Image (tube, rainbow, N blue to C red):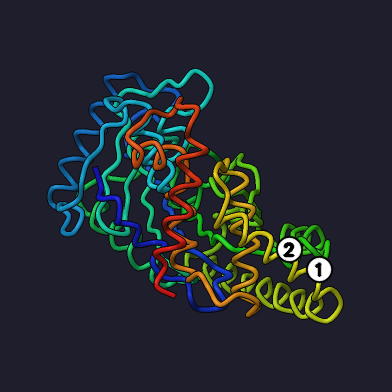
Amino acid sequence: MIPDDALPWLESGEAADGLVLSTRVRLARNLAGRPFAGRNSAMDREGILRLVEAAVEESGDLAAGTWYRLDGLPRAARRWLHERQLVSRELAGLGPGGRVASGAAVVVAGPVAVMVNEEDHLRIQSLQPGFALDAAWTAAGGADEALGSRLSFAFHSEFGYLTGCPTNVGTGLRASVLIHLPALVLTKEIARVLHGLAQVGLTHRGLYGEGSEVLGNLFQLSNQTTLGKSEAELLDHLGRLVQEVMGHEARARDVLSRDAASLVEDRVWRAWALLRHARALSFDEALNLMSGVRLGVGMGLLPGPSLVTLNRLLVLAQDAHVARAAGTGLEDEALPVHRATLVRRMLEEDPR
């Protein structure tokens, strides 16, 4: 397993008042001449995996990565990888029925992870801390170039890269940021802002991406289409709009400071007290309380904890991580107690 302290994509985030926790760039690729997902057999998927494994072995930094065969891991380990944003819910078989497709795998090398046999043959992604579109694109693009020099990708001269879902055809690029927008939620401006983003080609999701619920006022903002624009244009468009959203959030915080200072301060300190003293916490409750504390830190209402500690808790307070730290299973009824203990300990050990 990856060491518990290896969370490079959440180790920063102090910039921009911690609004953007992380940035992801993902590229969808398929192998030419091979049946796409949904039409391929177990033998096809195994063949695709062998080709990718061979290409990775000759691909610089990727060659030093760690491979995980999802179809050979227990559910707790698959969920652990999913909680770290290294694999999708679908690849990990965490949906209804819990079935993992044969040949499902991921190789992890620093900030880059390559999923094999998901909706596309390859999903190349880079996760970076903070607002870092250029760094995420450089890492994902480098892995794409290294693998593309050894594998033949399905490509059409007019439409670009061919993908399992039509909305990914073109560059195959999905860029996203995980951003914290509590003031827009409290001032009831969030619906207007999200509607405006949809009008100009952006979509929003929850912490776990497509199909996930928004919790803790954390939104994933990403481009909706990949066809008809270059990678640089897509990244520039997303970057400019995220800057606008950050401006909306900053102005909403100013409104709260002016018109509802006492109510916000009460909310922040109640969240801080509960996190520090609760003896049992669900993950949803912990996430919502951390949102209040993060808002308090960003608005200067609390002297701590550090945003790095809050970022780490975002992952380490999830079920599979809590169960692993406590040496128990996912079905343990005491998980809320173990979670509260973990949260209290990490807040007490926070250096700030």
In the image, what residue occupies the spot 56% across and 54% down?
277
Q: Residue flagged by tag 2: what amino acid is it?
A: Arg
Residue marked by disc 2: 267
How crowded is the residue under tag 2: few (<14 C-alpha within 10 Å), some, or many (20+)? Answer: some
Give the image location of residue 95, x and y in percent: 51, 27
Give the camera-side residue of 57 and 228.
57
Give the image location of residue 39, x and y in percent: 42, 22
In the image, what residue occupies the spot 59% across and 73% down?
297
Residue marked by disc 1: 263
In the image, what residue occupies the spot 32% across and 39% down?
31
Where is 15 relative to 321, above or below? below
In the image, taking residue 9 as reference, residue 178 lies left or right, namely: right
In the image, what residue occupies the spot 49% across and 54% down?
314
Q: In the picture, residue 117 is in which quadrant?
A: top left
Give the image location of residue 77, x and y in percent: 33, 34
In the image, taking residue 62 as reference, residue 335 lies left or right, namely: right
Residues under numbered marks 2 and 1 in contact, where contact means CB atoms less than 8 Å apart: yes
Give the image location of residue 157, x and y in percent: 43, 52
